[in-house]
Amino acid sequence: MDSQVMVSICCAAYNHEKYIRRTLDGFVSQVTNFKYEVIVNDDASPDKTAEIIREDEKKYPDIIHGIYQTENQYSKNIDITEKIFLPAVTGKYVAICEGDDYWTDPSKLQRQVDALEKNKDCFFCVHKTVEVSEDEQPTGITFPEVECTEGKILPDEFLMMGQNYQFQTSSYLFNGDMWREYEKNPPEFKTVCAVGDETYMLYFASLGPVYYIDSAMSCYRRGVPTSWSERQKKGNRSENICKSAEKMVRTLQSYDEYTEGKFHDICLIRESQQLYMRLMLSEKAKELLKSENREMFNKLSLKRKVATMAACCMPPIVYAIYRNRLFEKNY
């Protein structure tokens, strides 16, 4: 086996005492014909997360490398990927898995590396992911939720699929050079977006096709208190979603400039969906019918156009139905 590290796995952990062992087990169970490393950062967890990482670091010193913060970096608005993971990564490829998610297939890394090695025009590989509850019970949801054939996904198609987070971070494998370039010299749209997952998908779609493996090889754990999706539920949930939608519109506008209009129509379609969501949640659907929003309205699907008209005629009922359905999706 080559002594060079082929894959660096970045794992961010905070208050993951109940989950981190499962995550680390998924890493060390990988069967590969190459060397890989796990860089796991504990962000000063007050629970036993760091203790568990240290135990596994002693068991697997050639694989697991722990970084232990004494002060929480996230609360200081420090970019953990840029400041902590970037200097530590040495692999030709970079994988990501949060400390509350986990891998389920020992061949995951090998299959993803093989895919990118054979398809040099692809710089990003994703795969199917199963959603589970906090106690690891399947919810019946898999990502992507839309039908997808194994192989190369062209950028336009991927950008449309990427909306609503069809691909989970536990499935990500990046070309290391392109990942480093992105983190060292981040495009403006990265700094605007509320969710880092989204900007990865945008950036790598701009480089070329994305390779998709149609096998469930990881699990996304829903309902973890420290996760972004759960934090969105705190306080005024509608207001939180509206703020994220506004940021997503600015992100797409910035991305449109970055790609020099290459994906302009797709950006407009996705912007219209964010505007629709924000105005429906804030009970201002009539604004979609104003002349300044005509282009956005025309980009909406027929279903959303009908819903907009219905909201104008029967606002209390339609708004309540929309809000309940959106919240049921754990948005």
Image (spheres, grey):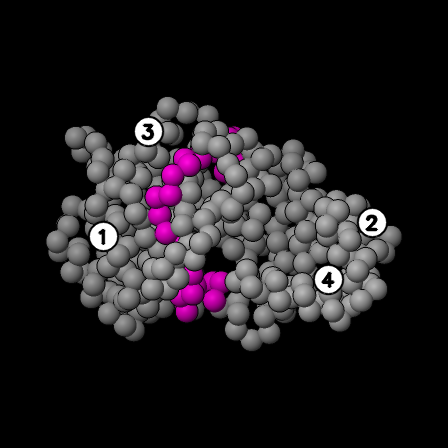
Marks 4 and 2, how far apart at CA? 14 Å
Marks 1 and 2, how far apart at CA? 52 Å
Residue 18 as seen in the image, left or right of residue 73: left
Residue designated by label 2: 294
Magenta span includes 219 = yes
Residue designated by label 3: 114
What residue sits 47% from the left and 63% below the top?
228
Q: Mark 2 or mark 1, which is nearer the start of the sequence?
A: 1
Q: Which region shows up in magenta?
A: 203-230
What residue sits 62% from the left and 67% below the top?
324
Crowdedness of circle 2 by 10 Å Cα count: few (<14), some, many (20+)?
A: few
Q: State if disc 2 and disc 3 touch (CB < 8 Å).
A: no
Q: State if disc 1 and disc 4 touch (CB < 8 Å).
A: no
What residue sits 69% from the left and 38% below the top?
264
Instruction: Find numbered disc 1 in the image and state the secondary structure of the residue it sits on.
Output: helix
In percent of width and height, residue 141 lies at 46, 52
Name the mark on residue 25. 1
Q: State if disc 2 and disc 4 touch (CB < 8 Å).
A: no
Name the foreground residue: 12 vs 33.
33
- Asked whether residue 25 is in view, the answer is yes
Disc 3 marks a residue whose amino acid type is Asp
- Asked whether residue 73 is in view, the answer is no
Residue 206 higher or lower than 249, as above or below: above
In percent of width and height, residue 301 lies at 72, 46
Image quarter in which the C terminus is found: bottom right
In percent of width and height, residue 254 lies at 63, 46
Name the mark on residue 279. 4
Marks 4 and 1, how far apart at CA? 44 Å
Residue 72 quadrant: bottom left
Residue 123 higher or lower than 192, as above or below: above
